[in-house]
Structure formats: C-alpha cells, structure tokens
Image (spheres, grey):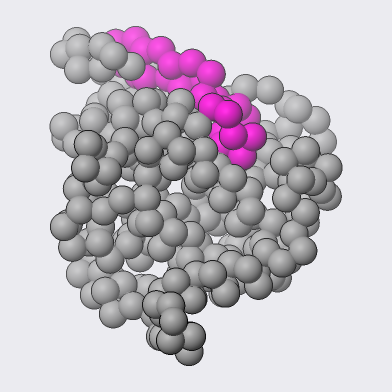
C-alpha cells in the first residue's frame, strides 16, 4: 500500500522552504535499511506540484494518538521510543542528524509499529561533523541548535528525551507564549539529579535513564516484527485511510504553473 504526498509549489515561497523540501527527499532516502523509517519509493514533479510516493502508514501519527488517548504508560512509550531509536541509529550511521523528532513525525503502520518520518530538517554533517543552521520545531530543539554555535548527532538525543517526556506527560516539557520564551525555557535545561563523582552528571543521567527504561525490552522481537504493538490501529483493510488522513483538501487544479525549474533535482 502506497501513499502519494502532494506539495504545491506555490506554497514554497522562500529559498529556505525550497531547500528543505529538496533536502527532505535526499535525507528521506538516508535511512533505507531501517524497518522503522517510513520508506520513500520515488519522487516526481510537474509544473504545479512535487510528488513523494511513500509507504502508507495507515495508523496515523503519535500526536493524534496523544490528543485522543492522553499520556501513554511507560511500556507504551518504551515501545515507540525503541522504534525511533532504531531509525535514528541508521541515520546516525550515515552521518545524518534528524533535528525534528516529535510525535507528529512518528507514524504507525497498519500493524501498530512506529515509523520515523519528517526529514525536512535532517542534515548531513559537514567535514567537521557539525551542522550549523537553525532548524526544528520550537520546544523540541536542542540548546546547541538554538545557540547556533554548531551541533551534531547528540542534538537528536536531546530531542529523544523531549519526545519521551511528551509521550509520558501528554505535552512537551518546554513551552512559552512565543518562540523566544520557548527557547529561553529550553536553555534553562532540566533539573539535575545525583550521580557518581567518577562520571559526569550528563553521562550518568543518560546511562542510568536509558538502562532502566529499556531493561528487559525485547529488541530482537522488535526487529523481527514479532512483538505485539501496544496500540493496534483500527484498519479494516489496506484501502482504509481513515486513520491516516488529516485533511480533506483537494489538490486538483489549485496550483499555478511554476517554470522556474528550482526543483530540477527533485
């Protein structure tokens, strides 16, 4: 079962918007070996629109599930986080940082397994193993992304922590009345915890937290697809798109012709 995403060119006004959609194509193909990354099969274009032919994830996204069901239990959060970790590991092996990890960008297939999507902010690291641009969603960005002093793969670990918090709490840990206040909240950080003097606080927090959270988790079952997902989407058939469709907007004949050829590499 496939899904066709239609992007109207007239909606991509600025050069940065156009660069991101082109980068999304490139980086969406950056994790082809992960079973927990949404597959991009092909892209094509015409004078009005860009098209992305992807794997259909009929179970919808985690943000919608959070909205409808409320905060997840730890076992449920553990399952989805494990799926995301597998996808991130594949990206990181290729030197790509995702930079926009949030429930909206994690989709469910018809079985209930999670698939990482939303690669518009993904970036291949440069020769210094860094990325420099300000990118991502407010409240989910790592402090080093906000400060624009260069960031790398650990920015996704921060995003993963925010992701886990949001699944458990129902809302993200950093919010504000506007973008500046949200960024300020992120830069204040998270309350410190006790840790052995022999290692840094950040290392202790990471090691202890992840070890406890995934203790006893069946990673082999996850990779083999033999685990029973905690939430099985109510998909009646492979033609049932009711859980995946968020808009009834028609794209037919809405876009003017764009002959500028900025998307020649799409």
- Seen at 23% across and 31% down, the residue is 19
- Seen at 33% across and 42% down, the residue is 121
- Residue 11, image x, y percentages: 27, 32
* Quarter of image, res 200: bottom left
- Residue 138, image x, y percentages: 32, 61
Is 80 rendered above or below residue 183? above
Left-right relation of 60 to 141 = right
Is 173 rendered above or below residue 138? below
Q: Is residue 178 visible?
A: no
Closer to the camera, 52 or 48? Answer: 52
Q: Which residues are magenta?
A: 32-57
Residue most toward the bottom? 194
Left-right relation of 55 to 262 = right
Left-right relation of 12 to 111 = left
Closer to the camera, 159 or 173? Answer: 159
Task: Assess whether residue 147 is covered by the magenta stretch.
Answer: no
Closer to the camera, 170 or 184? Answer: 184
Residue most toward the front? 198
Is 89 rendered above or below residue 76? above
Image quadrant holding the N terminus, namely: top right
- Residue 90, image x, y percentages: 51, 38
- Residue 231, image x, y percentages: 76, 54
Left-right relation of 22 to 224 = left
- Seen at 49% across and 76% down, the residue is 205
Image quadrant holding the C terminus, namely: top left
Q: Is residue 13 visible?
A: yes
* Quarter of image, res 15: top left
Task: Assess whether residue 56 is covered by the magenta stretch.
Answer: yes
Q: How many marks?
A: 0
Is 171 rendered above or below residue 66? below
């Amino acid at each position: 079962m496939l899904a066709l995403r239609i992007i109207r060119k007239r909606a991509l006004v600025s050069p940065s918007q156009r660069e991101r959609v082109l980068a999304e194509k490139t980086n969406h193909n950056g994790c082809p070996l992960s079973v927990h990354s949404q597959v991009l099969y092909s892209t094509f274009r015409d004078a009005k629109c860009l098209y992305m032919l992807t794997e259909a994830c009929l179970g919808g996204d985690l943000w919608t599930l959070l909205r409808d069901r409320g905060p997840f239990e730890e076992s449920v959060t553990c399952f989805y986080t494990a799926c995301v970790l597998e996808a991130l590991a594949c990206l990181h092996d290729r030197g790509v940082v995702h930079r926009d990890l949030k429930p909206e960008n994690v989709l469910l297939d018809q079985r209930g397994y999670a698939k990482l999507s939303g690669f518009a902010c993904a970036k291949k690291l440069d020769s210094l193993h860094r990325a420099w641009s300000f990118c991502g969603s407010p409240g989910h960005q790592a402090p080093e992304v906000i400060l624009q002093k260069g960031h790398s793969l650990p920015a996704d670990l921060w995003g993963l922590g925010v992701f886990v918090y949001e699944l458990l709490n129902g809302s993200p840990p950093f919010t504000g009345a506007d973008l500046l206040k949200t960024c300020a909240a992120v830069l204040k950080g998270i309350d410190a915890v006790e840790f052995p003097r022999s290692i840094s606080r950040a290392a202790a927090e990471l090691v202890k937290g992840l070890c406890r959270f995934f203790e006893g988790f069946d990673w082999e079952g996850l990779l083999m697809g033999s685990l029973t997902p905690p939430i099985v989407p109510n998909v009646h058939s492979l033609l049932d798109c009711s859980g995946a469709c968020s808009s009834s907007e028609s794209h037919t004949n809405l876009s003017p012709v764009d002959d500028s050829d900025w998307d020649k590499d799409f």
